[in-house]
Image (cartoon, rainbow, N blue to C red):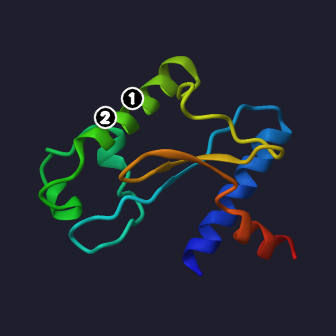
């Protein structure tokens, strides 16, 4: 249930931002930690800030986190801060095209990955 609630909150934020004509991007961080086999809240932060070698991070991500994933996430975040756009590989989220970047072993864009959650909350 926790994932569904968090996903619904993100959907609402995206819809609200789009209704005010603000560009919006959505992502799902699904890479799983070798420590507990889960993708959990804030696991994306060492990747976003490229801090895989920072003190204490290995306790959360394990001993061999993928540097290539950190490079990709960090590059997108830096581009967003610098250019207000994370880059051409990550399309905007709109109500017509619900694209989301999925940060996993192989980062990729999915069309409407929250379709099932949105259906439940729309019912």
Residues 104 and 16: in front is 104
**Is 47 left, or right, of 115 in this rendering?**
left
Which quarter of the rendering shows the N terminus?
bottom right
**Is 112 left, or right, of 75 in this rendering?**
right
**Is 51 left, or right, of 21 in this rendering?**
left
Direction top: furthest residue: 83
Under circle 1, the secondary element is: helix
The relative height of residue 52 versus residue 116 in the rendered view (above or below) is above
The relative height of residue 77 versus residue 106 in the rendered view (above or below) is above
> Which numbered dot is residue 75?
1
> Which numbered dot is residue 95?
none
> Which numbered dot is residue 71?
2
Direction bottom: furthest residue: 1
The quadrant where residue 39 appears: bottom left
Mark 2 is surrounded, within 10 Å at the Cα level, by few (under 14), some (14 to 19) or many (20 or more) other residues, namely some
Q: Identify the residue shown where x is 15% and y is 54%.
A: 64
Under circle 2, the secondary element is: helix
The quadrant where residue 38 appears: bottom left
Find residue 91 and report its horizontal and vertical position in percent: 64, 34
The relative height of residue 96 versus residue 2 in the rendered view (above or below) is above
Residues 84 and 30: in front is 30
Q: Identify the residue shown where x is 83% and y is 44%.
A: 96
Dots 2, 1 in contact, CB < 8 A: yes
Q: CA distance from mark 2 to mark 1?
A: 6 Å
Find residue 88 and report its horizontal and vertical position in percent: 57, 25
Find residue 50 and report its horizontal and vertical position in percent: 27, 37
Find residue 20 and report its horizontal and vertical position in percent: 83, 36
**Is 101 left, or right, of 30 in this rendering?**
right
Which quarter of the rendering shows the C terminus?
bottom right
Q: Identify the residue shown where x is 15% and y is 57%.
A: 58
Mark 1 is surrounded, within 10 Å at the Cα level, by few (under 14), some (14 to 19) or many (20 or more) other residues, namely some
């Amino acid at each position: 249930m926790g994932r569904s609630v968090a996903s619904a909150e993100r959907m609402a934020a995206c819809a609200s931002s789009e209704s005010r004509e603000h560009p919006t991007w959505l992502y799902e961080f699904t890479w799983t930690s070798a420590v507990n086999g889960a993708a959990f809240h804030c696991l994306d932060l060492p990747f976003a800030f490229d801090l895989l070698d920072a003190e204490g991070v290995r306790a959360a991500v394990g001993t061999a986190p993928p540097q290539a994933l950190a490079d990709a996430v960090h590059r997108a975040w830096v581009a967003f801060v610098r250019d207000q756009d994370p880059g051409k590989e990550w399309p905007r989220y709109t109500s017509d095209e619900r694209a989301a970047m999925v940060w996993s072993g192989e980062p990729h864009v999915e069309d409407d990955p929250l379709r099932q959650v949105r259906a439940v909350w729309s019912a």
